[in-house]
Image (cartoon, helix red, strand yellow):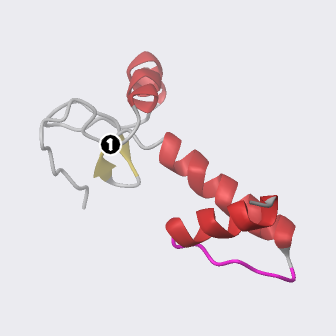
Amino acid sequence: MTYKQVIEELCVVNFLSWDHDDPMGTVMRLLEYEVQLALDPRISKQAVDLITQYGGCFERQCPICESPVIDGKCQDIGNNNCTYTEG
């Protein structure tokens, strides 16, 4: 496989668009997606470890399970099935 085929396949698998006129933009969208995925505490143990280690840096904590609240939603790092949402 060529590098172009690999990138196209990754875009298809991750439901990202491939722009033939902007290959660098396509690669950047793919990298951004992978970084977001790696930082999601519901998916990545490393993300949970970072949040646990630096959790005091977050402005708000969930009043139910004390997990960080990001964008108004509890991140539930302890997998307590917490569904707290602000507002």
Q: Mainly helix, strand or loop, the magenta region?
A: loop
Q: Horizontal and vertical percent for residue 84?
A: 18, 50
Between 87 and 24, the residue placed more toward the observer is 24
Determine whether 84 is above or below 43 in the image: below
Q: Which quarter of the figure is the N terminus placed in?
A: bottom right
Q: Horizontal and vertical percent for residue 58?
A: 44, 33
Q: Decide whether residue 16 is among the magenta residues.
A: yes
Count of numbered badges drawn on the protein: 1
The residue located at (12%, 43%) in the rendering is 81
Which element type, helix, strand or loop, lies under badge 1?
Answer: loop
Residue 85 horizontal side relative to residue 72, left or right: left
Q: Horizontal and vertical percent for residue 65?
A: 16, 32
Residue 43 horizontal side relative to residue 46, left or right: left
Determine whether 60 is above or below 26 in the image: above
From which residue to which does the magenta span run? 14-21
Residue 33 horizontal side relative to residue 26, left or right: left
**Which residue is disc 1 drawn over?**
42
The residue located at (34%, 54%) in the rendering is 72
